[in-house]
Amino acid sequence: MKLVSKAKILPFAITLTIVGLDQLTKFLVKKYLVYGYSYSLIGEVLKLTYVKNPNTLFSISLGPNFPYTILGFVLIAVLVVLILHENKLSHSLIYGLLLGGAAGNIIDRLRMGEVVDFIDVGISPTLRWPVFNLADSAITIGLIIYFIIVLKGVKKGEIND
């Protein structure tokens, strides 16, 4: 009997954790926060603001008829294939973060046709980042780790053109 490597288990454990936390926080936001109202946690720096997002990550619109749900399923399929062929733990971490984020948001799209966002950061009422959620955070962290690994590889000359 062949044991499954940590590189295969880790991304799915991360995915399940992210999806669970993402869906729990969105449930709590919908239950306890008033839509469109901001609750200050740390002055203007951090607020909870319940909004609905019909677009993609950080409210970026790819057009009114863009098939966001199909894009989400394609991303999930690609990530699962990458996970099944991956042996590096660092890459498995990245894929788990990306898969968890994509799955968390696709669940919202399938259930409601849009995504619940609530994390609101900025430094003033006019200088604010688009409102986002835990799934968006996981995707962003995964991409940051990926670019750090790529840049380290470029610096060491490990990546060929």
Image (tube, grey):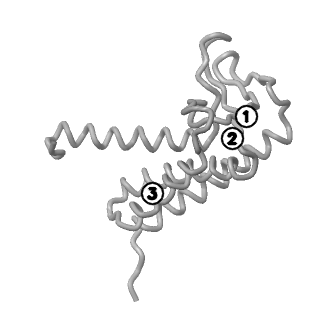
Tell me the residue that label 2 is attached to. 115
Tell me the residue that label 3 is attached to. 79
The picture places residue 6, in percent across and down from the top left corner, at: 41, 67
Image vertical order of residue 58 relative to residue 45, above or below: below
The residue drawn where x is 67% and y is 55% is 20
Image vertical order of residue 120 relative to residue 141, above or below: above
* Residue placed furthest toward the front: 65
The residue drawn where x is 54% and y is 33% is 62
Please rate how many residues cluster around mark 1, counting C-alpha atoms within 10 Å: few if below 14, some from 14 to 19, many from 20. Answer: some
The residue drawn where x is 66% and y is 47% is 22
Q: Which badge, 1 or 2, is on the more N-terminal residue?
A: 1
Q: Which badge, 3 or 1, is on the more N-terminal residue?
A: 1
Three-letter amino acid code of the residue under disc 1 = Lys
Three-letter amino acid code of the residue under disc 3 = Leu
The residue drawn where x is 15% and y is 45% is 160
- Mark 1–mark 2 contact, CB under 8 Å? yes
Which mark is on residue 146?
Answer: none
Cα separation, mark 2 vs mark 3, equals: 21 Å
Q: Secondary structure at mark 1?
A: strand
The picture places residue 89, in percent across and down from the top left corner, at: 37, 59
Looking at the rendering, which quadrant does residue 129 occupy?
top right
Cα separation, mark 3 vs mark 1, equals: 26 Å
Which mark is on residue 52?
Answer: 1
The picture places residue 21, in percent across and down from the top left corner, at: 67, 50
**Quadrant assignment for the C terminus:** top left
Three-letter amino acid code of the residue under disc 2 = Val
The picture places residue 155, in percent across and down from the top left corner, at: 18, 36
Residue 86 left/right relative to 132: left
